Amino acid sequence: MVKLSQVCSVLSGFAFKSNYFGDSGIPLVRIRDVMRGFSETYYSGEYDEQFVVNNNDILIGMDGDFNIAKWAGGEALLNQRVCKIAPVPSIVDADYLYYFLPLKLKEIWDETAFVTVKHLSVKKINDIEIPLPKLSIQKEISAMLRASDSLRNQSIKMESELNALAQAVFLEMFGDPISNPLAWSKVSLDEIAQVQGGLQVTGKRSSLPVTVDYLRVANVHKNELKLDQIKTIQVTQSELDRTCLKIGDMLVVEGHGNKDEIGRTAVWDGSIEYCTHQNHLIRVRFDESVAVPEFISRFLNSDGGRYQINKICNTTSGLNTISANSVRSLKVPLPPIHLQRKFISFLNALKLQESKNLEIKEYIKTIFEALMQRSFSGKLNLNKVA
């Protein structure tokens, strides 16, 4: 075991002057850019060459989640609170280090106290201890982990391609949502659906007789429900009768700090038998003889829907909101019901493929994490793996 400072140099970024930030110059790598691999902030002032980073340099964000990634955005500058790890090539393999460090950073993150945001120091990074087998062994471990990581990345890429395919088929069948080239008739939501708000979550509910699961903003994403964390609320029976969700109900996010996320929608699939929703979600229940909920949801999450939602959004004290009345006024195209259903049949087939891909992705992730643990604990028999 050796300390990181013995086999690497750790360079902390520079506090570049913000009055030189703009739309021209050299890209500036800030914490938010580490994982996404590109920067939209440019610096036009003078700088020291030691703060230049290039593709494949290992970078760590020193605030928040302590993210680590290989830079992929071309020549750029290392801003403050981002550090660059440069291994000594004759001692430590760069990929070996890249795969090992997330394990230690997770340990440090778990141990770090915080009030608002967790902070990482250069000293803490320098003091990280790493197992250091011979360089040839490091390279064998790196090659094995790269192969596993490649499979993992392929499954992520497949997920992205399936989502893109759904959007492409939507455009092929119904045209651009904004220009409406096929001249579909448009109706307001209140002509084809009932729109209703949800229940306010307060401490006063503790004495109410019925305990039931409820959905929050965190459960409703664009065309997707995330139900891994469900909370309960106490209600009256009449409240439950009024707000209990039915399969096909579309849920609209009523309030969010990010304007791009306000108004995102997903359709309830009945995963929980009795379930209601809080007041930060608006329920839309359709006349399904004229409108297919998943089709309307796809439209509202498209550029055409977003254009309308951004126009009706209100911003107060940093929170973006839309009202139930505003949702009622949203205009949606209404192609023939048989075309809407045909699109949904395609979506259902796509969801089946997405489900299979998710199983593969989780399986690969489990294998990759197991290989990581065994590789850096000295328990991996490389001859057996080969």
Image (tube, rainbow, N blue to C red):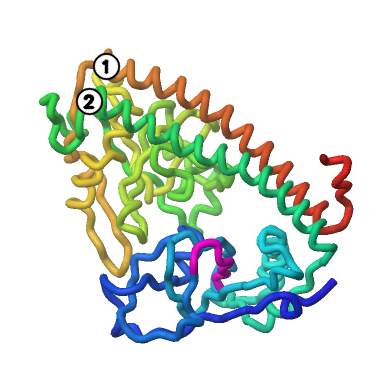
The residue lying furthest to the top in this view is 338
In this picture, residue 46 sits left or right of residue 88: left
The residue that label 2 is drawn on is 174
- Magenta residue span: 54-61
C-alpha span from label 1 to label 2: 9 Å
- Looking at the picture, how far across and down is residue 139, in whole percent? 75, 56
Q: Is residue 212 visible?
A: no
The residue that label 1 is drawn on is 339
User: Does residue 83 lie above or below 33 as drawn?
Assistant: below
Query: Across the whole image, how many numbered discs are drawn on residues?
Result: 2
Element type at mark 1: helix
Disc 1 residue type (three-letter): Leu
Looking at the rendered image, the quarter that the C terminus falls into is: top right
Q: Is label 1 in contact with label 2 (beta carbons under 8 Å)?
A: yes
Element type at mark 2: helix
User: Does residue 88 lie above or below 380 as drawn?
Assistant: below
Tell me which residue sits at (46%, 58%) in the image: 36
In the depicted view, which residue is nearer to us: 322 or 274? 322
In the depicted view, which residue is nearer to us: 197 or 29? 29
Q: Is residue 319 visible?
A: yes
In this picture, residue 268 sits left or right of residue 23: right
- Looking at the picture, how far across and down is residue 33, in whole percent? 45, 65
- Looking at the picture, how far across and down is residue 31, in whole percent? 48, 70
User: Does residue 241 lie above or below 136 as drawn?
Assistant: above
Disc 2 residue type (three-letter): Phe
